[in-house]
Every structure is written in structure tokens, then in C-alpha cells.
């Protein structure tokens, strides 16, 4: 019984090797096409991931710059208010302006 199984498996193995030797070029060509198509999908996925990551980094930078811009605008507004308030602190110049300093 074992001899019959070995003979059967030997026949199947021989047929498999023969079939493989005849069709291996076609199988390899089909595998190459499949790998090429899947590589395109993988490449697209990697590009999309990289783009998404870059957009997230840009949004973080944008938020940081928005805060900095608000701070700078507030400082500029304060400087404008200070500049507008300066003329009201000036004293009028009279003809005896030099005598006030001596007193």
C-alpha cells in the first residue's frame, strides 16, 4: 500500500515538475504584472500618507504662526495707542519756556 502511495506521489510530482517547466514563464510574467499593479497601489498609498502627514505638520505651523501673528498685532495696536497718547502729554511751548527749567 505504501509503495502504491509512493508511486502515485512520484507520478504527481513528476507531472507537477513537467507542468511547471512548461508554464513557469507565463506564471512569472503574470506575477510580475500583479506585483507591478500592486506596487502602484502601495506607492499611491505611501504618497497619500506622506501628503496627509505634511498637511498635519503645516496645520500645526499655521496655528503657531496664527498665535504669533495675534501677539504681534496686539503689540502693534498697543504701540499705536501709545503713539496716539503721546501728543496729549506734550506741554505747550511759550515764550518763557527757558525760565521754567531754572525754577
Image (cartoon, grey):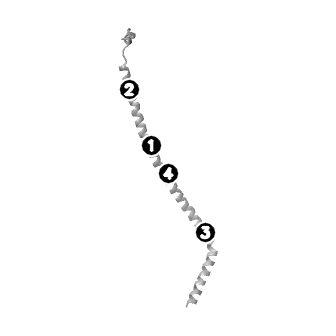
User: Residue 40 falls in which quadrant of the image?
Assistant: bottom right
Disc on the earlier residue, 1 or 2? 1
Q: Pinpoint residue 46: horizontal percent, then vertical percent.
A: 51, 56
Q: Secondary structure at mark 4?
A: helix
- Residue identified by numbered label 3: 28
Residue depicted at 38% across the width and 30% down the height: 78
Task: Answer few, some or many: residues within 10 Å of disc 2's Cα (few below 14, many 20 plus, some between 14 and 19).
Answer: few
Residue 51 is labelled as 4
Q: Disc number at residue 62? A: 1
Alpha carbon of mark 3 to alpha carbon of mark 1: how far?
Answer: 50 Å
- In-front residue for pair 13/24: 13
| Image coords of residue 81 (percent x, y) | 37, 27
Which of pointers 1 and 4 indicates the residue nearer the eye? 1
Cα–Cα gap, marks 1 and 4: 16 Å
State the quadrant of the N terminus.
bottom right
Closer to the eye: label 3 or 4: 4
Disc 3 from disc 4: Cα separation:
34 Å
Q: Which mark is residue 82?
A: 2
Question: Circle 1: is it few (<14), some (14-19), or many (20+) Cα within 10 Å?
Answer: few
Q: Which numbered disc flags the more N-terminal residue, 4 or 2?
A: 4
Is disc 3 in contact with disc 4, using a CB cutoff of under 8 Å?
Answer: no
Q: Are marks 4 and 2 in contact (CB under 8 Å)?
A: no
Residue at far front of view = 103
Q: Residue at x 42, y 43 (%)?
A: 63
In the picture, which quadrant includes the C terminus?
A: top left
Cα distance, mark 1 to mark 2? 30 Å
Callout 3: SS: helix
Q: Is residue 75 above or below residue 103?
A: below
**Residue drawn at (57%, 62%) of the image:** 36
Amino acid at each position: 500500500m505504501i509503495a502504491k502511495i509512493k508511486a502515485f506521489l512520484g507520478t504527481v510530482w513528476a507531472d507537477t515538475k513537467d507542468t511547471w517547466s512548461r508554464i513557469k514563464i507565463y506564471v512569472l510574467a503574470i506575477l510580475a504584472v500583479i506585483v507591478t499593479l500592486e506596487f502602484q497601489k502601495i506607492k499611491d498609498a505611501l504618497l497619500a500618507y506622506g501628503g496627509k502627514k505634511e498637511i498635519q505638520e503645516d496645520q500645526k505651523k499655521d496655528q503657531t504662526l496664527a498665535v504669533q501673528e495675534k501677539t504681534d498685532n496686539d503689540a502693534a495696536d498697543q504701540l499705536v495707542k501709545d503713539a496716539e497718547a503721546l501728543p496729549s502729554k506734550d506741554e505747550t511751548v511759550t515764550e518763557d519756556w527757558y525760565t521754567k527749567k531754572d525754577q
